[in-house]
Image (cartoon, rainbow, N blue to C red):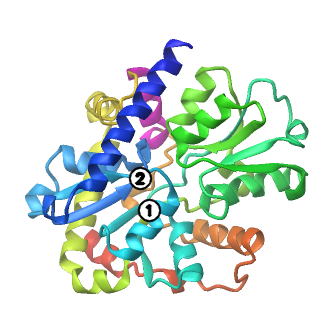
Amino acid sequence: MTLLTRSLAVGLLTLATLIGACLTSQAADGDLRVKVFPGPVNLALFAAREKGFFAKRGLKVEIQFTVNSKEQRDGLASGAFEIAQSGVDNAVALVEGAKADIVIVAGGSNGMNEFVVRPEISSFADLRGKKVVVDAPDTAYALLAYKVLALEGIARDQYGVTPAGGCPQRLAAMKADPLNAAAMLNLPCNLLAVKEGFKSFGAAVDKVGPYQADGVWVRREWAKANAERLIAYLQACIEGYRWAADPANRLEVNAMVARVLNLSPEIAAGSVELAVGPNPGLAKDLKFDLAGFKTTLQLRAEMQNGDPNAAPQKYLDLSFYDRALGGL
């Protein structure tokens, strides 16, 4: 086992401990509970907590880590927490599949996903007869992986699918079984994988075009009843983004990401560079990318028999974001 592999294993164990603590916590621990996947994509959220941007608005925010999208979707729908931040396709899935009244209120990023394969894979053609590792087989980055494969001439019946959970779990599954030959990996797992000899076959957005990956989504009824708190939350996150994106704060941001996510300084710095560097994956001020969201909806229509004529506005209420941005 390499030093990096041992480090990742320790990180996963630490993450599991954190998740267990979060799942047993009560609402009294904070007046807002936010469930996210552990990753640099949540840079603005981490910065808002780190720099006191929530506290100055009278908010106590508990950040919970999730292990997979099903847990996150089910938890938000049941009211186990107030805010979810991850792939907005999961919000669409809740609306269409579970008939839950969920609404997307802000953007986040293009996902910074790369299609990563095991070291022995030399071409997309080599993936025929292998398996693609996904979070859940019917949402978000799984659909993105299927689309990339389709564009490369690999039909859906030519490979299998292994559901594994979040990015660390997907990478671990690829390491554990050579049959698990590929995965769509986001930060920091794409960087960790390449460092260990895995290969990147390119960024997802280079294949499919603009893509709205993660965003902020909540129960519509809760948003209406807690508009001021939601607006204050979004303002703090926007302020967190601005602090994190300022080059003058880069060393402090790198150190924060390394500490919060238990990453090496090298991987933390690389992640921050991809998130807020010259070609940033994070959206400025959490702005929602409508063109990218249309791609997200098109993928669901194509890969999951979704409504090809679904209107984006059905899933959106950006009025809270507009008020938050206007008040800064």
Q: How far apart are marks 1 and 2 (CA)?
A: 6 Å
Mark 2 is surrounded, within 10 Å at the Cα level, by few (under 14), some (14 to 19) or many (20 or more) other residues, namely: many
SS under mark 1: helix
Q: Magenta-highlighted stretch: main secondary structure?
A: helix
Residue 312 x/y as whole percent = 57, 81
- Residues 273 and 49: in front is 49
- Residues 293 and 262: in front is 262
Q: Which picture quadrant has residue 10? A: top left
All told, the count of numbered labels is 2
For the question of whether residue 38 can be seen, the reply is yes
Residues in magenta? Answer: 265-277
Q: Which of marks 1 and 2 is nearer the N terminus?
A: 2
Image quadrant occupied by the N terminus: top right
Q: Residue at x 11, y 63 (%)?
A: 57
SS under mark 2: loop
Disc 1 marks which residue? Answer: 72
Is 271 one of the magenta-colored residues? Answer: yes
Q: In this view, does 184 lie to the left or right of 258?
A: right
- Residues 129 and 295: in front is 129
Is label 1 in contact with label 2 (beta carbons under 8 Å)? yes
Q: Residue at x 85, y 57 (%)?
A: 156
Q: Residue at x 71, y 32 (%)?
A: 177
Disc 2 marks a residue whose amino acid type is Thr
Disc 2 marks which residue? Answer: 66
